[in-house]
Image: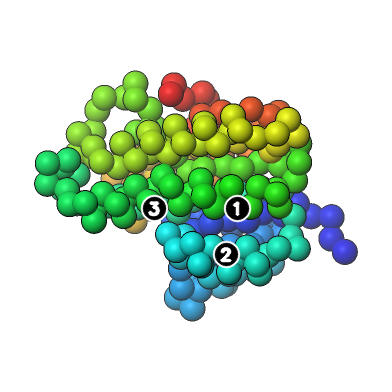
Amino acid sequence: MTNAKTALIIGASRGLGLGLVKRLTEQGWDVTATARDPQKAHELKAIDRVRIETLEMDDPQSLEALAHTLNDQVFDLLFVNAGIIGVPHQSAAKATAAELGELFLTNVTAPVRLAERFLGQIRKNTGVIAFMSSGLGSVTSPGAPEMALYKASKAALNSLTNTFFIQLPDDAPTVLSMNPGWVRTDMGGEGADLDVETSTSGMVEQVKAYAGKGGHHFINYKGETVPW
């Protein structure tokens, strides 16, 4: 029987999710990671001590199947990483109902729905539930009009996460809305400031630092508070 910390990482086939799995396993955590298609998650499959499960986060049936598979597990960390940029034009005037529906379902509703479903399996008091937010989710940051709809989705995620948090019991896990920084991933692009290792190493350190503190915190990978 292992005494290792346990983590459930949602959306781990590439980028920041994959980086989180690597950092945690390097530190001896037992990690369960999800991917939409595990057969194509070659880098994830190459990591030792990782249990890989299938999840299409927007699909309630897929979520229920995952919850049934993992119903006997208790996790010290749930990190919900999945998200999309959505429509390339990022224009409210041009966006269709289908485009907006997919963007806000994937980036806002589905992450919180998942956290609600797994809440009972996150270790009380010392556990952490982390949502991958963005500095662009701060409404004090008026820039980046080219990312307007993505920004709105991350601000909405922060808001819905806050509502999720205030309904939790006193012995609930700490809740983090994490700004990973601008990272060189498929989403962030090659011109971004940070590599995946720097960002994910920082986020893992914040998870460990905030475990047991309680509350809901909007922070970056360095532990600096981000204004709502």
- Work out whether residue 95 can be spotted: yes
- Badge nearest the viewer, 3 or 2: 2
Q: Are marks 2 and 1 in contact (CB under 8 Å)?
A: yes
Observer-nearest of 120 and 151: 120
Secondary structure, mark 3, is helix
Q: Residues within 10 Å of mark 3 (few under 14, many from 20)?
A: many
At a point 34% along the width and 21% down the height, the residue shown is: 140
Q: Position of residue 38 (x, y in %)?
A: 50, 73
Q: How many marks can you see?
A: 3
Residue at which label 3 appears: 106
Q: Position of residue 39 (x, y in %)?
A: 49, 78
- Badge nearest the viewer, 1 or 3: 1
* Residue 13, placed above or below residue 209: below
At a point 19% along the width and 44% down the height, the residue shown is: 90
Which residue extends farthest right?
A: 1
Give the left or right position of residue 62, taking residue 28 as reference: left
- Work out whether residue 48 can be spotted: no
Q: Position of residue 192 (x, y in %)?
A: 33, 43
Question: What amino acid type is highlighted by mark number 1?
Answer: Arg
Q: Are marks 3 and 2 in contact (CB under 8 Å)?
A: no
Secondary structure, mark 2, is helix
User: Quarter holding the N terminus?
Assistant: bottom right
Residue at which label 2 appears: 64
Mark 3 or mark 2: name the one nearer the start of the chain: 2
Task: Specify the label residue 117 is tagged with.
Answer: 1
At a point 56% along the width and 72% down the height, the residue shown is: 45
